[in-house]
Image (cartoon, grey):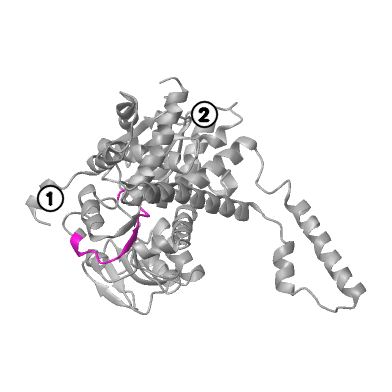
């Protein structure tokens, strides 16, 4: 992209505002309410010191609260050198709309620490994370009833466990302390299915899209997910799980993977597990023995495929490459991977975009389940799983008795019997709840998309649904 084009490219925060404005121009909100929903309520900037390697190192972190129409507010904490106030506030706004769209009872928040976690040892990261958590918690910016962080880019279960433990140390009599953060390890109050949640949500989103032939036709595609060529940008937690489930469970073919050091492409399809293992061991895809290596991985975004899955950073599809994107269907597994300018170009081309607002909401949905689990102090399925199995056993026993007594002689196949008799545990219930959430959210977007002539794409439909729900919450409070 040349310098002139770069200067015309809206930033991430501007992109979010532009997309918000597109939606509210089609709404009739009371005077002043539009501005109240759009603006970020508060951003706290913290600069703290940690003694490392014989010297004091100063770090800068942020926690932004976009909307408190519902509390607590919810949003991840990312560790990256690119973290800045504008980015955090834009992500917090997306969280507000995302939570409203999938009907999780949270306002939007986001946090970040300007740091490259790869430059520090595990012990150093723990010291930094605990001090960051301390600075936020003492200002109620980490609290089960006010502000509940989660993992994001550069953080994971480990960091969430440290944050939860730090909060407990500061609030020793808070019985709900575990609910101060989600995305924790299972043994530390987490929930099964959380690590895979965002990638699983991407799969469920595509499954729901392909249940509607009219929508599939609008993307110039036909049939189901089986055999569809998929290119994934970013094989981190989200991209890996999305690619894994799409290939193993839906029959899709992962033809391309884009990483920071380049990309690999194979028309025959790539083994997702093998590629992931290579990346973990070598830090990138370079040298992977199968497929064709491309030094400039971004070029693969423009390769022929059926579905493009940007699953890493924001702004990877921009004014400089949007016109060359060939994928008829793009699902935004990352936050803001398509800029506002690129979005307009793609819409004019007829590209169907399943927006980030919906597509990557699996993480916050399962975080909601974890938060509820922590507040209820009981594992999902514990009270009903064996009772469910016992009731199913009664049905199977009665069917087998009828077969014997009537002399029919048929038997229930062992595979069916085993599956039917197995009661739903926590993982099955989490996946069921997530699937239901993604289906319901898509239906709400789809209804607006198809019923209102002036709504030309799913992104505007998603914003209309989300903003409408936020507006109703504020109006119920008397605003």
Q: Where is residue 386 in the image (x, y as percent from the top left)?
A: 76, 53
Q: Which callout, 1 or 2, points to the residue nearer the camera? A: 1
Residue 335 shown in magenta: yes
Identify which residue, 426 or 289, lies in the foreground. 426
* Residue 356 visible somewhere in the drawing: yes
Magenta range:
323-336
Which quadrant, please, contains the C terminus?
Answer: top left
Q: Do the residues labelled 1 and 2 touch (CB within 8 Å)?
A: no
Residue 307 pos. (x, y %)? 35, 65
Give the residue at x 29% y 60%.
Answer: 351
Callout 2 crowding tier (Cα within 10 Å): few <14, some 14–19, many ≥20: some
> Given the current orientation, which residue lies at the most extreme right position?
405
> Please, what secondary structure does the residue beneath circle 1 have?
helix
Depth order, front residue of 43/104: 104
Residue drawn at x 71%, y 57% as measured from the top left: 423
Which residue is labeled 1 in the image?
Answer: 6
From the viewer's perspective, tell me whether residue 190 is left or right of residue 27.
right
Secondary structure of residue under mark 2: loop
Residue 192 appears anywhere in the view? no
* Residue 226 lies in the magenta stretch: no
Q: How crowded is mark 1: few (under 14 residues within 10 Å), some or many (20 or more)?
A: few
Q: Distance between the residues labelled 1 and 2?
A: 42 Å
Q: State the image quarter where residue 277 is shown.
A: bottom left
User: What's the mark number on residue 433?
Assistant: none
**Residue in view at x 30 percent, y 63 percent:** 259
Q: How many labels does the image show?
A: 2
- Predominant secondary structure in magenta? loop
Residue nearer the viewer, 206 or 256: 206
60 over 258 or under it: above or below: above
Q: Mark 2 points at which residue?
A: 145
User: Can you give x and y, in whole percent of width and height, for residue 73 in the image?
Assistant: 44, 33
């Amino acid at each position: 992209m040349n310098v002139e084009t770069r200067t015309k490219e809206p930033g991430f925060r501007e992109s979010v505002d532009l997309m918000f404005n597109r939606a509210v121009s089609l709404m009739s909100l009371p005077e002043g309410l539009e501005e109240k929903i759009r603006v970020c309520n508060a951003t706290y900037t913290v600069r703290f010191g940690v003694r490392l390697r014989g010297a004091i190192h100063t770090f800068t972190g942020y926690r932004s609260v976009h909307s408190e129409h519902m509390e607590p507010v919810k949003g991840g904490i990312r560790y990256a050198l690119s973290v800045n106030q504008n980015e955090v506030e834009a992500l917090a706004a997306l969280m507000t709309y995302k939570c409203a769209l999938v009907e999780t009872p949270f306002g939007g928040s986001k946090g970040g620490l300007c740091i490259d976690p790869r430059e520090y040892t595990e012990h150093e990261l723990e010291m930094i994370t605990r001090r960051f958590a301390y600075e936020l918690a003492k200002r109620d910016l980490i609290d089960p009833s006010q502000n509940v962080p989660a993992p994001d880019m550069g953080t994971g279960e480990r960091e969430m466990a440290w944050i939860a433990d730090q909060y407990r140390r500061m609030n020793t009599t808070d019985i709900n302390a575990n609910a101060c953060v989600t995305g924790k390890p299972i043994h530390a109050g987490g929930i099964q299915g959380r690590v895979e949640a965002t990638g699983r949500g991407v799969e469920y989103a595509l499954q729901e899209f392909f249940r509607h032939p009219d929508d599939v036709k609008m993307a110039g595609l036909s049939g189901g997910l089986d055999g569809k060529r998929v290119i994934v940008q970013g094989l981190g937690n989200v991209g890996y799980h999305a690619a894994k489930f799409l290939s193993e469970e839906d029959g899709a073919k992962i033809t391309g993977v884009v990483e920071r050091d380049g990309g690999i492409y194979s028309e025959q399809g790539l083994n997702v597990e093998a590629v992931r293992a290579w990346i973990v061991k070598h830090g990138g895809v370079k040298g992977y023995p199968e497929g064709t290596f491309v030094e400039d991985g971004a070029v693969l975004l423009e390769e022929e495929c059926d579905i493009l899955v940007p699953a890493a950073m924001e702004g990877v599809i921009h004014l400089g490459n949007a016109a060359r994107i060939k994928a008829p269907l793009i699902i935004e597994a990352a936050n803001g991977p398509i800029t506002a300018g690129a979005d307009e170009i793609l819409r004019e081309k007829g590209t169907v975009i399943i927006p980030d607002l919906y597509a990557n909401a699996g993480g916050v949905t399962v975080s909601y389940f974890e938060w509820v689990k922590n507040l209820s102090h009981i594992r999902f399925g514990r009270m009903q799983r064996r009772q469910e199995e016992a009731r199913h056993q009664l049905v199977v026993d009665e069917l087998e008795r009828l077969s014997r007594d009537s002399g029919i002689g048929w038997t229930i196949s062992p595979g069916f019997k085993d599956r039917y008799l197995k009661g739903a545990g926590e993982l099955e219930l989490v996946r069921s709840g997530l699937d239901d959430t993604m289906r319901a959210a898509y239906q709400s977007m789809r209804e607006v998309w198809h019923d209102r002539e002036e709504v030309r794409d799913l992104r505007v439909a998603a914003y209309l649904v989300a903003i409408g729900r936020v507006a109703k919450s504020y109006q119920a409070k008397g605003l």
